[in-house]
Image: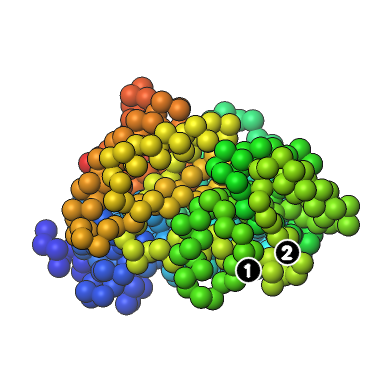
Amino acid sequence: MTQSALIEELKTLLEPGKVLTDADSLITFGKDWTKHFAPAPLAIAFPKSIEQVQAIVRWANQRQVALVPSGGRTGLSAGAVAANGEVVVAFDYMNQILAFSAVDRSVTCQPGVITQQLQTYAQEQGLYYPVDFASAGSSQIGGNIGTNAGGIKVIRYGMTRNWVAGLKVVTGTGELLELNKGLIKNATGYDLRQLFIGAEGTLGFVVEATMRLDRAPKNLTAMVLGAADFESIMPVLHAFQSKLDLTAFEFFSDKALSKILARGDVPAPFDTACPFYALLEFEASHEQVAEQALATFEHCVEEGWVLDGVMSQSEQQLQNLWKLREYISETISHLTPYKNDISVTVCQVPAFLADIDAIVERHYPDFEVLWYGHIGDGNLHLNILKPQNLSKDEFFDICAGVNTQVFEIVQRYNGSISAEHGVGMTKRDYLHYSRSPAEIGYMKAIKAVFDPNGIMNPGKIFPL
Ligand code: 2HG
Ligand code: ZN
């Protein structure tokens, strides 16, 4: 069948105008925030109902057409990139909040609901959706579930997985499954819901999700602390965690901070220059909590771990302190960073970071390296910036070599090659550094059960 005949057939499954093939749409909807792969989809399909999603999947099986799910396309691992003539299934028209239960503290959403839309909706009900990250204004719930998104509050609230009470999914055969149906307690064998969370659309499409909400936090307060050296950050974490329930514990290097300050629109936290900074957050629900935080800060200064610090006194100051950390990724995006999103257990972080730093310094002394991330969860973002004298391709080729060395260290520490961004295409060749051959074998067997014809996001997680 010709490509145009396929497109005409696809159009009959959807409402008029809901299949796009113009060059702009193919580029826009064919890629995410990664820069490694050129988008080349066949068409973009916009279903408006579960039935239409099922019809697309059945048709794709019949015609052996690969499908790529598309949410807010903010991914950083090319999990939503269509580079091989696939049909992109975009959920922009399935973007409604369908139901709310105050008693269950749950919201039922279509997959195209923007993360921030869910956060705002929760707030309007006096509740809280705690999964949060810089791209929450664009990313969609379906994509958050597909990648098991993490972000800045994981230390307290966990990842997206913790907040999914029920899922409706269309499997790779077009079958609709209702998984867990919002239950808290359900001991009836395999929890298939969990398989679809973090599956990056390789098993099927998430077409509806019931998300849990939490009580709203009271008087969130942030501190930014300047650490004497990297080793000091872990005792600081330990000191604060033994006194307070932290809602975040992030870090960034002086180099990362200098990029933020160069923007000119974010105030410096204080004047003292420090090699690393920690940003921590807690609920100052009453006076004693803030006093406890200040006493712990003083203890950290006396120990020589912390050189300077600041605590937010207003909502505006809280936001400004968060900008120091949350704006980093976007601020450096034009510098073509080579990204790594790696994790180890928290206690191993200092030795792990030192080992990676040594490798990069020894072999790639000309590369500018920025460290930041969710250090309270053991999740580090290693960003290497492209030197001006290298082309994008030359730079990424060299970085592939760095990757192997970094991932050997990750493997030695029993860490993860992707803490929160997913495997997608950028890390599929390295999966064996984090998962054993036996595990990968079982993973592939699971995919074959839900997607026997291999039409669901092929080439993601595993090589084609
Ligand atoms: C963050 O924590 C995001 O800011 C992006 O996960 C990380 O830019 C990155 O490498
Ligand atoms: Zn992150």
Q: 320 left or right of 403?
A: right
Q: Residue at x 66, y 37 (%)?
A: 235
Instruction: Give the SS element for disc 1.
Output: helix
Of residues 422 and 323, the one nearer the viewer is 323
The residue that mark 2 highlights is 312
> Can you tell which quarter of the image residue 405 is in?
top left
**Res. 233 visible in picture:** yes
Q: Position of residue 366 (x, y in %)?
A: 29, 51
**Mark pair 2, 1: CA separation:** 9 Å
- N-term mark: 2 or 1: 2
100 up-or-down from 247: above or below: below
> Can you tell which quarter of the image residue 20 is in?
bottom left
The residue that mark 1 highlights is 320
**Res. 111 visible in picture:** no
Of residues 193 and 58, the one nearer the viewer is 193
Q: Is the residue under label 1 in contact with that under label 2 (CB below 8 Å)?
A: yes
61 up-or-down from 270: above or below: above
Q: Residue at x 61, y 40 (%)?
A: 232
Of residues 329 and 91, the one nearer the viewer is 329
Of residues 92 and 276, the one nearer the viewer is 276
Q: Position of residue 181 (x, y in %)?
A: 61, 46
Q: Residue at x 11, y 62 (%)?
A: 2
Quarter holding the N terminus is: bottom left
Amino acid type for the residue under numbered disc 2:
Ser
Q: 448 left or right of 166?
A: left
